[in-house]
């Protein structure tokens, strides 16, 4: 429970549209606390529902879910502390809360590269404000952070990052550290190229005034789980980081504005912009979004998933902590289809960023959780793949750990390939 209750808002703001649909297609769904769990026996009437809370979390947690959902969609403006520089104005711009998937917004990263257009230059001084593009400003800021231009500009590579799905993220936070370490050790012992590593990073936020989910102190060594390169370990820090770095919204966890060309240290709302409750309610919302119902897989297709080693990285289940504060997510086998580890995906998926994300390198990425893929329209970190077949083939480039897996996939018959892709697309 959070210390400051949110003011009551009209029903149309607090009840997700998907709950109203739930009432129309499945009896007994009107009580959000009784939302069926995301399991194969949940009933086919739930197959297209998303943005609903995990079953059995209780009325207080459902209230937090609703309040966090509303905050997630709010468009922030100058009076809220937006800026002085920003990339997007709402969480939902990059993580679409209506369907739990990617929103229309994308962040851009930039890196000074060598003549090959790929290798990061050891001299990044032409980007004094860092690798993230911040194209929008609010008064009194006048200078955005954008790639340098002009005849004397260095060779800068700009890449896109689409906001990942927010479905089932509480399960990822709940996974035991020892589980992630166990899988990393098992992969280190493999005789093929698949060797994922843990992205251990130094906790970069201030302590959360509410230590319910963690009591981390600045500098604590934490296993990264969130972000496309697993650079953040907890959902409250992930929210605080996004508010700060995407919207210029400061909070008790991230109380300072990021450096900018105009040297501004504040914005239109003096002092810290958001409360700890503003951060925590958004985090609670993301923590308790259910994994959508999944059909019982074709056992033959599921076996092919193992046969071509997709499951070596997209591990079907990882066990969660028995003491995780949300009982419904504690001590369960979370069906998340990821090992939570960084893997080298080769030059073809490199973003040319040399540092800033723990031990991640330009070509390493956290294994994407295969959750809600049947609702997706674009795949991989930058959305370059528009079909699952494209996504599989893009796993294969110079230096990719997945090269052998892609080769085995190509060795399947056409019918087997279709069956495997249909299985992945059903998740």
Image: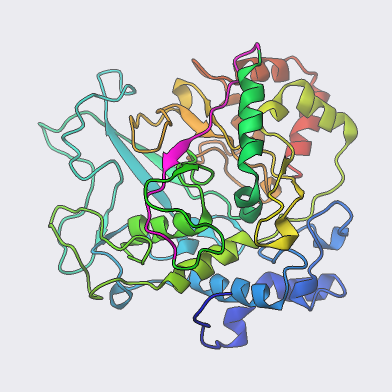
Can the viewer see residue 247 in this picture? yes
Q: Quadrant of residue 17?
A: bottom right
Q: Is residue 295 above or below residue 44?
A: above
Q: Quadrant of residue 390?
A: top right
Find residue 406 and report its horizontal and vertical position in percent: 65, 20
Q: Quadrant of residue 58?
A: bottom right
> In the shown orientation, is residue 425 left or right of residue 129?
right
- In the displayed orientation, state which residue is furthest to the left: 152
- The front one of 81 and 331 is 331
- The front one of 410 and 143 is 143
Read off the magenta span. 191-208
Find residue 377 and report its horizontal and vertical position in percent: 61, 47
Q: Is residue 203 magenta?
A: yes
Can the viewer see residue 167 in this picture? no
Q: Quadrant of the N terminus?
A: bottom right
Task: Identify the residue at image location x=73%, y=56%.
Answer: 292
């Amino acid at each position: 429970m959070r210390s400051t209750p949110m003011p009551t808002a009209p029903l149309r703001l607090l009840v997700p549209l998907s709950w109203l649909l739930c009432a129309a297609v499945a009896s007994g769904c009107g009580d959000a606390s009784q939302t069926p769990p995301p399991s194969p026996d949940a009933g086919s009437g739930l197959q297209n529902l998303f943005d609903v809370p995990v079953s059995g979390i209780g009325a207080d947690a459902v209230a937090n879910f609703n309040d966090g959902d509303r905050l997630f969609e709010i468009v922030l403006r100058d009076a809220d502390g937006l800026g002085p520089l920003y990339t997007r104005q709402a969480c939902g711009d990059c993580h679409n809360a209506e369907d739990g998937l990617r929103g229309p917004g994308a962040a851009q990263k930039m890196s000074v590269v060598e003549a090959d257009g790929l290798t990061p230059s050891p001299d990044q001084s032409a980007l004094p404000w860092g690798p993230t593009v911040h194209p929008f400003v609010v008064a009194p800021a006048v200078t955005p952070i954008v790639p340098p231009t002009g005849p004397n500009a260095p060779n800068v590579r700009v890449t896109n990052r689409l906001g990942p799905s927010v479905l089932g993220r509480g399960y990822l936070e709940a996974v035991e550290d020892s589980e992630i370490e166990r899988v990393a050790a098992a992969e280190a012992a493999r005789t093929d190229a698949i060797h994922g590593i843990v992205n251990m990073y130094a906790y970069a936020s201030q302590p959360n005034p509410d230590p319910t989910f963690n009591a981390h102190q600045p500098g604590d060594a934490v296993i990264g789980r969130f972000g496309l390169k697993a650079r953040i370990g907890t959902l409250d820090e992930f929210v605080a980081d996004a508010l700060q770095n995407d919207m210029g919204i400061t909070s008790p966890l991230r109380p300072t504005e990021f450096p900018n060309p105009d040297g501004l240290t504040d914005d239109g709302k003096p002092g810290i912009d958001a409360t700890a409750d503003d951060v925590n309610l958004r985090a609670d919302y993301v923590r308790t979004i259910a994994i959508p119902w999944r059909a019982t897989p074709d056992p033959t297709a599921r076996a092919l998933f193992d046969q071509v080693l997709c499951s070596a990285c997209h591990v079907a289940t990882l066990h969660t902590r028995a003491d995780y504060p949300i009982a419904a997510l504690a001590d369960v086998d979370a069906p998340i289809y990821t090992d939570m580890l960084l893997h080298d995906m080769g030059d073809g998926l490199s973003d040319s960023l040399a540092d800033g994300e723990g031990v991640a390198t330009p070509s390493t990425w956290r294994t994407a959780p295969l959750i809600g893929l049947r609702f997706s329209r674009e795949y991989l970190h930058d959305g370059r793949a528009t079909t699952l077949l494209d996504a599989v083939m893009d796993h294969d480039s110079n230096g990719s750990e997945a090269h052998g897996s892609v080769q085995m996939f190509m060795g399947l018959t056409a019918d087997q390939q279709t069956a495997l892709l249909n299985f992945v697309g059903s998740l």
